[in-house]
Image (cartoon, rainbow, N blue to C red):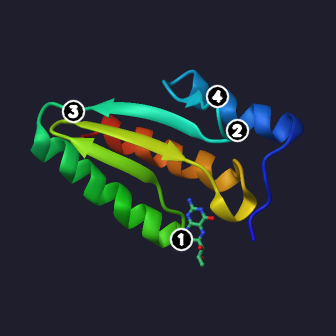
């Protein structure tokens, strides 16, 4: 079981993500980002890489793809909110997108 992020740990984990295009959802304790790539192959290639990381972390995104756009929502279902794993996967996704 992963613990929910709270207090200054939460602020510290979220700050770099919010500065990098992630937003906290209004209606649930989750973060969201839209990734736009050059084309479908780039988008799907990025999803494939991210999926391998997600599986290794045993932490899985809610996401959808339309052509070159991927909508990603991260939350920790077991904790009913944001945990350090969401921050970890978000950073991996940003790093992978930078080199896509
Ligand atoms: C049983 C299994 O380890 C859990 O259900 C894992 C799998 N992947 C998960 N992914 C996410 N995003 N949240 C979870 O709580 C979660 N739990």
- What is the residue that sits farthest to the top in this orientation? 19
Q: Residues within 10 Å of mark 1 (few under 14, many from 20)?
A: few
Estimate the spatial distance between the alpha carbons at disc 4 and disc 3, rounded to whole Å. Answer: 26 Å
- What is the residue that sits farthest to the right in this orientation? 7
Q: Residues within 10 Å of mark 3 (few under 14, many from 20)?
A: some
Say which residue label 4 marks.
26
Say which residue label 2 marks.
13
Kindly indicate whether the residue at mark 2 contacts the one at mark 4 (C-beta within 8 angstroms).
no
- What is the residue that sits farthest to the front in this orientation? 27
Quarter for ligand 1?
A: bottom right
Quarter of the picture holding the C terminus: top left
Mark 2 or mark 4, which is nearer the start of the sequence? 2
Q: Number of numbered discs present?
A: 4
Q: Which one is closest to the eye, mark 4 or mark 2?
A: 4
Estimate the spatial distance between the alpha carbons at disc 1 and disc 4, rounded to whole Å. Answer: 26 Å
Say which residue label 1 marks.
58
SS at badge 3 = loop
Kindly indicate whether the residue at mark 3 contacts the one at mark 4 (C-beta within 8 angstroms).
no
Q: Determine whether the beta carbon of the residue marked 1 sits less than 8 angstroms from the nearest atom of ligand 1.
A: yes
Estimate the spatial distance between the alpha carbons at disc 4 and disc 2, rounded to whole Å. Answer: 18 Å
Quarter of the image holding residue 48?
bottom left
Quarter of the image holding residue 24?
top right
Q: Determine whether the beta carbon of the residue marked 4 sits less than 8 angstroms from the nearest atom of ligand 1.
A: no
Report the residue at 35% width, 45% height from top. Answer: 96
Mark 3 or mark 4, which is nearer the start of the sequence? 4
Say which residue label 3 marks.
37
Q: Position of residue 76 (x, y in %)?
A: 64, 57
Q: Position of residue 89 (x, y in %)?
A: 52, 51
Quarter of the image holding residue 1?
bottom right
Estimate the spatial distance between the alpha carbons at disc 3 and disc 2, rounded to whole Å. Answer: 25 Å
Mark 1 or mark 2, which is nearer the start of the sequence? 2
Q: Position of residue 63 (x, y in %)?
A: 39, 49
């Amino acid at each position: 079981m992963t613990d929910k992020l709270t207090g200054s740990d939460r602020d510290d984990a979220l700050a770099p993500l919010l500065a990098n295009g992630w937003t906290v959802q209004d209606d649930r304790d989750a973060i969201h980002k839209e990734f736009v790539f050059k084309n479908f192959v780039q988008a799907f290639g990025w999803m494939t890489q991210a999926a391998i990381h997600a599986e290794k972390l045993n932490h899985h995104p809610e996401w959808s793809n339309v052509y070159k756009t991927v909508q990603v929502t991260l939350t920790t279902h077991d904790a009913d909110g944001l945990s350090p794993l969401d921050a970890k996967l978000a950073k991996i996704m940003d790093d992978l997108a930078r080199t896509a």
